[in-house]
Amino acid sequence: MIGEFELIRKLIEGWKPARDVSIGPGDDSSAIVADKKRLLLQSTDLLLENVHFCKGWGTPYQLGWKALAVNLSDIAAMGGTPSHTHLNLAVPPSWSETEIIELMSGFKAMADRYGVSLLGGDLSSSPDLLVVSVFVNGNALESRVIRRDGAKPGDIIWVSGLLGSAAAGLELLKNNIVTDPQSELLNPFLMPQPEIELGTICAQNGSVNTLIDISDGLAGDLGHILEASNTGAKLIREDIPLAEDNPAYADLPDFDRFEFALRGGEDYRLLGCTPRSKFDRLNISVKNQLGRALYAIGEIESETGLRLISQEGGVEEIKAVSHDHFKRFDL
Ligand SMILES: [Mg+2]
């Protein structure tokens, strides 16, 4: 079977954007012109039982929270402010009404945090698997929206948080090593935090050339930026912020903190590129407003491809590939 991104490319072939479409398929959100200065951002994501989650991995509340959080993350990745949502559910007999109501309370808690209102949706039965499909709206000033195609050679590549803990949480669940939904080790996977505030700071600051949220993994999502911007990059191995180690990880087969940070998905931190001369000013502004700093991890280069540099001077050409959602759980 062809990969997810190859299939998406085939599916969107031949669609011509209408005149009011500012950003079509291929970025974190699409955007249509709302008025002279504003764009209406739109994004959608589908969570399917046994592909994106399994019943019993976390509570229904956490699933509802995550379903909206991952969508809001795509609005954050444009520098936008989320505003509205639609929720579609296809519910199989194995999910009780109580569980669906609990799912909705998690969804609402995430919505309330960012003042997002529910516009509507659809509810259907399903033969055997739960489907949660979410659509979100947001808005951004047209002059401030941050796309994937703006990376320039010399830009500093940064990420907004530690990487790899969500993928490690997923592996802990898959291997039945940690199953308590309240465990801190599972929290990054079960209840991701969309970086709405940081996205807004980036848009206001004006020094962020490109932005994406890390849903598929650092290497893959950086790959999307490089492809859209027609550039390459180097990453400094020792500068990539790894998730804190934990004794529970020792029980995971093939666990490697660095590989999980590089290729594990679902961290939902932001990955951005900023001209070197403007990075310190951006970072001070982030520290002042959020009380935490960005991590500079590499640099955009004109030569295409992705290179991993180590402090001893080693240079390794690596693949900018993503976690493939088609093969997620090998069920
Ligand atoms: Mg995204």
Image (spheres, helix red, strand yellow):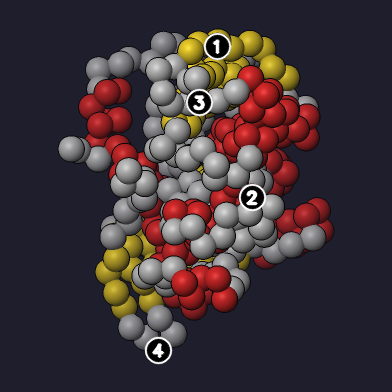
Q: How crowded is mark 1: few (under 14 residues within 10 Å), some or many (20 or more)?
A: few
- Left or right: 327 as drawn, with respect to 84: left
Q: Which numbered disc covers residue 123?
A: 1
Q: Name the residue: 36% across, 70% down.
A: 254
Of residues 153 and 286, the one nearer the viewer is: 286
Place residue 27 in its image quadrant. top left
Task: Check disc 4 and report the residue beneath it.
Answer: 312
- Within 10 Å of disc 2 (Cα), the crowding (few <14, some 14-19, many 20+) is some
User: Is residue 88 shown to the viewer in this render?
Assistant: yes
Which amino acid, by three-letter code, is at mark 3? Answer: Ser
Q: In this view, does 256 lie above or below 51?
A: below
- Whether residue 202 is situated above or below residue 104 in the rendered picture: below
Provide the secondary structure element on which disc 4 rests: loop
**How would you rate the neighbour count of disc 4 (Cα within 10 Å): few for under 14, some for 14-19, many for 20 or more?**
few
Question: Disc 3 vs disc 1: Cβ atoms closer than 8 Å?
Answer: no
Frontmost of labels 3 and 4 is 3
Between label 2 and label 1, give the one nearer the viewer.
2
Amino acid type of the residue that numbered disc 4 sits on in the rendered structure: Glu
The residue under the point 40% across, 89% down is: 312
Q: Mark 2: which amino acid? A: Pro
Lower position in the chain sequence, tag 4 or tag 2: 2
Mark 4 → mark 1, Cα distance in angstroms: 57 Å
Q: Which residue is drawn at 64% across and 45% down?
A: 191
Distance, label 2 to label 1, CA atoms, is: 27 Å
Task: Name the residue carrying label 3.
Answer: 94
Give the secondary structure at mark 2: loop
What residue type is disc 1 on? Leu
- Residue assigned mark 2: 181
Q: Name, please, the residue furthest toward the bottom.
A: 312
Closer to the observer: label 3 or label 1? 3
- Image coordinates of residue 166 in percent, x first then y, are 54, 55
